[in-house]
Image (cartoon, grey):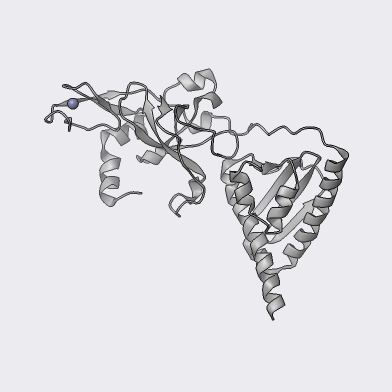
């Protein structure tokens, strides 16, 4: 949220200029009570009869003050940034909490990854405009020691391409049968979806190659501007990876029995790239649109 007043004042304040130009986080120290506030009260302490404050730099590692909520469906202003956590952190050297966005390099941001007390590190976007969204935090445990210690760490210095896929136990014969059966059903559904005018609209203009890994095998899903194709093969360089122990999780979602989105949030389905949550959302629409068209045909 923002008001025009905050935004115009924000871009010109030393706090935002320091983020934008120097990759520093500024706070202020009260000359009377000694409290260090971040973001700073630029001139006077509101608690000490307006005693003067001094601007100083604080650390870029901090601890979560509480467990942050996660936004999966953002307003249009933040749609390109979701899903993200939003929480308050106490940076080293500060006494008050700063509100920041939170991400992970391990795939999709799910509940439990960042909790109260988790140590987090400030990361600066490469292109900064002088707003609070110029920075966000990652769990410090996902970074190298050097990165965690470095001030002014840039987004482009972080390895986003090696998220850890979940490991599954060895499949039984029953699991293998289940896999074959589920893939066949999904293929049949995909053919129907590709033939449905309405369903095609759900993935119009979208193109993604997805490798799906399950306990008993791997298959490929391709979204190509309305066409939806499922093949039992390994995909060499997918746009992202999905992993779910039981392929039925995905089959149910495509059959419109519960949503795939929920499976992601409930940690039944893992995806390798946070921002591909968008694609998951489109797959849910694909399933919904097909069911809607079938219902309409029936009622005619
Ligand atoms: Zn004070």
Q: Is 132 placed left or right of 51 in the picture?
A: right
Question: How many circles with numbers are drawn on the protein?
Answer: 0
Residue drawn at 76 percent across, 41 percent down: 214
- Picture coordinates of residue 140 (x, y %)? 50, 25
Between 197 and 97, the one lying in front of the other is: 97
The residue furthest bottom is 300
Write the residue at 34% across / 28% down. 25
Q: Where residue 228 sits in the image (x, y, percent)? A: 73, 58
Quarter of the image where ligand 1 sits: top left
Name the residue furthest left: 49
**Is 20 drawn above or below residue 28 in the view shown?**
below
Which residue is rendered at x = 41% and y = 25% of the image? 62
Q: Is residue 161 above or below residue 176?
A: above
The picture quadrant where one finds residue 116 is top left
Can you say which quadrant of the picture contains the C terminus?
Answer: bottom right
Determine if residue 205 is in view.
Answer: no
x, y percent for residue 17: 31, 35
Left or right: where 33 falls relative to 169 = left
Is residue 6 visible in this depiction of the protein?
yes
Give x and y (percent) for residue 191: 78, 62
Residue for point 54% across, 38% down:
111
């Amino acid at each position: 949220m923002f008001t025009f007043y905050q935004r115009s004042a924000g871009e010109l304040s030393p706090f935002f200029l320091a983020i934008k130009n120097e990759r520093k986080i500024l706070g202020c120290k009260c000359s009377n009570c000694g409290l260090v506030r971040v973001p700073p009260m630029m001139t006077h302490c509101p608690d000490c009869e307006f005693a003067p404050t001094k601007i100083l730099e604080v650390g870029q590692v901090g601890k979560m003050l509480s467990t942050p909520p996660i936004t999966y469906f953002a307003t249009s202003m933040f749609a390109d940034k979701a899903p993200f956590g939003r929480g308050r952190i106490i940076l080293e050297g500060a006494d008050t909490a700063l509100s920041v966005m939170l991400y992970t390099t391990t795939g999709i941001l799910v509940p439990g990854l960042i909790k109260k007390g988790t140590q987090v590190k400030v990361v600066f976007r490469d292109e900064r405009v002088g707003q609070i969204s110029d920075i966000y935090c990652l769990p410090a445990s996902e970074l190298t020691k050097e990165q965690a210690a470095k001030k002014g760490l840039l987004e482009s210095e972080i390895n986003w391409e090696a998220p850890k896929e979940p490991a599954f136990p060895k499949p039984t014969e029953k699991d293998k049968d289940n896999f074959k059966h589920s893939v066949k059903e999904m293929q049949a559904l995909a053919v129907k979806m590709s033939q449905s005018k309405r369903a095609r609209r759900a993935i119009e203009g979208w193109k993604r190659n997805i490798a799906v890994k399950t306990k008993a095998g791997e298959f490929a899903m391709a979204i190509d501007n309305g066409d939806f194709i499922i093949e039992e093969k390994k995909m060499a360089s997918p746009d992202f990876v999905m992993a779910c122990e039981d392929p039925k999780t995905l089959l149910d979602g495509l059959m419109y029995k519960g949503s795939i989105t929920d499976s992601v949030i409930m940690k039944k389905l893992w995806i390798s790239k946070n921002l591909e949550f968008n694609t998951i959302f489109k797959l849910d629409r694909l399933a919904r649109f097909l069911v809607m068209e079938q219902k309409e045909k029936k009622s005619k």
